């Protein structure tokens, strides 16, 4: 089965939203209460991506991963959220739940780092849920290290602790 990457198009965004919601439920169900994952609906998540790319499309990049023509993952990156012009932010890598462990996430991560390098960014950062041990191991295997920075964010009604990771590009 062949994995391929390409830039997302507007026609992909509703499917990306549905995949994003499935990925969140699978990844966070042991961390968050069910009511935190009940919303947004897959359709609402698709509309979120349509709107987000309307505002951020000029300086952000979404890449989709397809396996034999089926959307199985995506990454999203852009400038640093703290304003450092030498740093890129990996906003997201999400996969279909059955795609975990198949190398797709790593392929998307390597591609995102290459894209950051192409933009002359020398450092990459991301935020990850503190309690998402699986994601933290994934990023650590990819050379990312916790910076010591943390923040509290919201997923639905739940407050979640996030930690910041960084690595050289």
Image: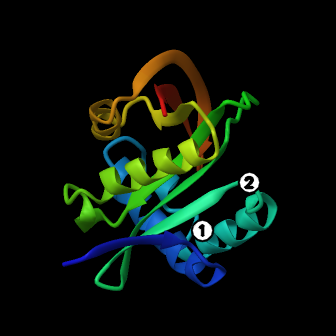
Instruction: Pinpoint residue 142: horizontal percent, then vertical percent.
Output: 32, 36
Give the alpha-carbon distance from disc 1 to disc 2, as whole Å: 21 Å
Q: Residue at x 49, y 17 (%)?
A: 147
What is the image's colouring?
A: rainbow
**Number of marks:** 2
> Which x, y percent locates residue 39?
56, 62
* 57 sits to left or right of 139: right
Q: In this view, does 77 lie to the left or right of 168?
A: right
Q: Quadrant of the N terminus?
A: bottom left
Up-down relation of residue 40 to residue 138 (above or below): below
Q: Nearer the viewer, residue 157 or 101?
A: 101
Q: In the displayed structure, does residue 14 sit left or right of residue 169? A: right
Q: Residue at coordinates 56% horizontally, 73% vertically from top-left? A: 8
Mark 2 residue crowding within 10 angstroms, few (<14) / some (14–19) / many (20+)? few
Residue name at image x 73 percent, y 31 percent: 85
Q: In the displayed image of the protein, which residue is found farthest to the right?
A: 55
* Horizontal and vertical percent position of residue 36: 51, 51
The residue pinned by badge 1 equals: 45
- Is the residue 57 above or below the residue 11 in the image? above
Q: Name the residue under label 2.
A: 59
Label 1: few (<14), some (14–19) or many (≥20) C-alpha neighbours in 10 Å: many
- Are discs 1 and 2 less than 8 Å apart at CB? no
What SS does tag 1 mark? helix
Q: Earlier in the sequence, mark 1 or mark 2?
A: 1
Image quadrant assignment for residue 55: bottom right
| Residue 52 position within the rendered picture, expressed as x and y whole percent measured from the top left | 72, 62
Q: Which of 160 and 119 is in front in this view?
A: 119
From the viewer's perspective, is 109 left or right of 85?
Answer: left
Residue sitting at x 29%, y 39%: 138
Which of 112 and 48 lies nearest the eye of the viewer?
112
Q: Is mark 2 on a helix, strand or loop?
A: loop
């Amino acid at each position: 089965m062949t994995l391929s990457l390409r830039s997302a198009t507007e026609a992909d965004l509703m499917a990306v939203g549905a995949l994003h919601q499935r990925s969140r439920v699978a990844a966070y169900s042991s961390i968050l209460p069910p009511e935190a994952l009940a919303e947004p609906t897959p359709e609402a998540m698709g509309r979120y991506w349509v709107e987000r790319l309307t505002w951020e499309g000029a300086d952000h990049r979404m890449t989709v991963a397809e396996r034999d023509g089926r959307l199985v993952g995506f990454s999203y990156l852009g400038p640093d959220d703290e304003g450092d012009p030498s740093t890129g932010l990996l906003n997201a890598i999400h996969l279909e739940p059955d795609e975990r462990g198949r190398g797709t996430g790593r392929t998307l991560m390597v591609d995102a780092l290459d894209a950051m390098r192409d933009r002359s960014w020398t450092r990459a950062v991301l935020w990850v849920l503190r309690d998402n041990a699986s994601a933290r191991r994934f990023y650590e295997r990819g050379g990312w290290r916790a910076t010591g920075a943390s923040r509290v964010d919201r997923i639905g009604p739940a407050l979640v602790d996030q930690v910041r990771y960084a690595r050289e590009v």
